[in-house]
Image (cartoon, rainbow, N blue to C red):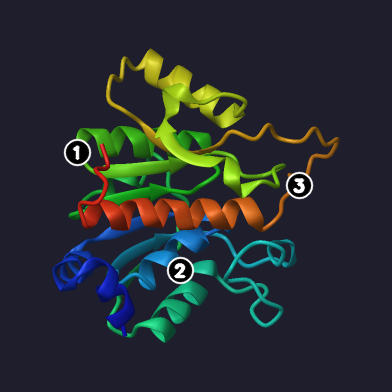
Amino acid sequence: MFDRLELLIGKESIKKIKEKHIVVLGLGGVGGFVVESLVRSGVENITIIDNDIIDITNLNRQIIASNNNLGNKKTEEFQKRILSINNNVKVNKINDFIDKSNIDDLFNQKIDYFIDACDTINTKKLAIKKCLDKNIKFITCLGTGKRMDPSKLKIIDIRNTKYDPIARILRKYIKDEKISNKILCCYSEEKPKKIQSKTIASSIFVPSTAGILIASYIIRDICKEKELS
């Protein structure tokens, strides 16, 4: 099924991709497209984490959401979707909220790449610290709401970001913790639109592209076309 991808990257790279264990934390607009892109690129060992259910408000941007599965657990629906694409994939699904009480359990396994696509700041901080402590390659995703231009996305060190309120908090965290390592993040240079609403405005364009960009970066790193460091 990966004949066309093999033409691009070669048989040896396909083998390497299949052997990697990748963790995706958060299965929303970004994380869903990360999972979709990784599975369609040959990843066969994946852990997916989310404690949420599919809601009608997800229909405008989340790849797993449809009118047929509203109210269902995201992890359950993603497992079905993954196996419908490639039934060789080993799916480890965790339907929990990750915090300091259980994050050690998550990291008690070999992880090659960790993608943080969750919305909770404290969980992001914990994940960053754990990945650094265990020398795991990772990317954390920043805000994709209130934006419309996917061409403004890039993957850079979080120290080089601006406009993003999540980035501001995380920059302070790594400064306070005296973290000198590069902290790779998926970040939009587009200024978020000022919208007077407690609900975060969103479209499919930026989160989906962010997910595909993150997955592409990881696959290219496995193929050694780009170093993730």
Which amino acid, by three-letter code, is at mark 1?
A: Asn
Residue type at tag 2: Glu
- Sequence-wise, the earlier of marks 2 and 3 is 2
Q: Mark 3 or 1 closer to N-term?
A: 1
Q: Which mark is residue 108?
A: none
Which residue is rendered at x = 40% and y = 62% of the image?
Answer: 48
Nearest to N terminus: mark 1 or mark 2: 2
Q: Nearer the viewer, residue 29 or 14?
A: 14
Considering depth in this image, is 60 or 132 the residue closer to the camera?
A: 60
Q: Are marks 3 and 1 in contact (CB under 8 Å)?
A: no
Name above or below for residue 18 compared with residue 26. Answer: below
Q: Is residue 137 above or below residue 216?
A: above
Residue 202's place in the image compared with 84, above or below, is above
Disc 1 is placed on an element classified as: loop
**Is 155 in front, or is 44?**
155
Residue 194 x/y as whole percent: 80, 32
Identified at 65% across, 35% down, the residue is 190
Question: How far is disc 3 from disc 1 in space, using C-alphas?
Answer: 35 Å
- Could you tell me if residue 26 is visible in this image? no
Is disc 2 placed on a helix, strand or loop? helix
Q: Residues within 10 Å of mark 3 (few under 14, many from 20)?
A: some
Spatial distance from mark 1 to mark 2, Cα to Cα? 25 Å
Q: Which residue is mark 1?
A: 135
Q: Which residue is at 34% across, 70% downward?
A: 41
- On-image quarter of the C terminus: top left
Is 58 situated left or right of 51 in this image? right
Residue 188 in picture, x, y percent from top left:
57, 38
**Identity of the residue furthest to the left in this view:** 12
Decide if residue 34 is in sight here.
yes
Q: Which mark is residue 36?
A: 2
Q: Which residue is mark 3?
A: 201
